């Protein structure tokens, strides 16, 4: 049974991968701050959800 947190992890990782190349293009453009903000928010969301998922898996019995 898959956790309900897996789609959130997938969406956050998708937006990180989409936003990250934009950060490497032109740092003086106004979009740079937008993509940087998006990247920071989704990276925090990704790591928090990953932490919750690991905590959830560790609480379940293995058998």
Image: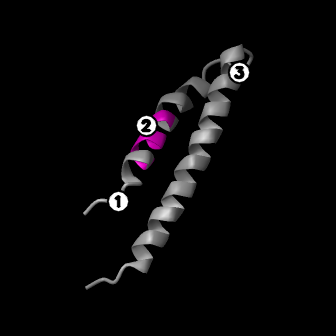
Distance of label 1 from label 2 (alpha carbons): 18 Å
Q: Earlier in the sequence, mark 1 or mark 2?
A: 1
For disc 1, the neighbor class at 10 Å (few under 14, some 14 to 19, many from 20) is few
What is the magenta segment's predominant secondary structure?
helix
Q: Would you identify the image quadrant in which residue 40 lies?
A: top right
Magenta region: which residues?
A: 9-15
In magenta segment, residue 12? yes
* Mark 2 neighbour density, 10 Å: few (under 14) some (14–19) many (20 or more): few
* Way the structure is coloured: one colour
Per the image, label 1 sits on a secondary structure element best described as loop
For marks 3 and 1, give the CA distance: 38 Å
Secondary structure type for disc 2:
helix
Residue 17 within the segment the image draws in magenta = no
Q: Position of residue 21 (x, y in %)?
A: 53, 28
Circle 2 residue = 14
Identify the residue at the far right of this view. 28
Front residue (pair 29, 2): 2
Q: Residues within 10 Å of mark 3 (few under 14, many from 20)?
A: few
State the residue at coordinates (37%, 55%): 4
Q: Point out the frontmost of discs 3 and 1.
A: 1
Which residue in the structure is indicated by mark 3? 27
Q: Residue at x 37, y 46 (%)?
A: 7
């Amino acid at each position: 049974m898959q956790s309900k947190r897996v789609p959130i992890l997938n969406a956050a990782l998708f937006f990180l991968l989409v936003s990250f190349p934009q950060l490497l293009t032109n740092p003086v453009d106004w979009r740079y701050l937008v993509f940087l903000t998006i990247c920071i928010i989704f990276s925090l969301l990704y790591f928090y959800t990953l932490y919750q998922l690991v905590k959830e898996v560790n609480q379940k019995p293995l058998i």
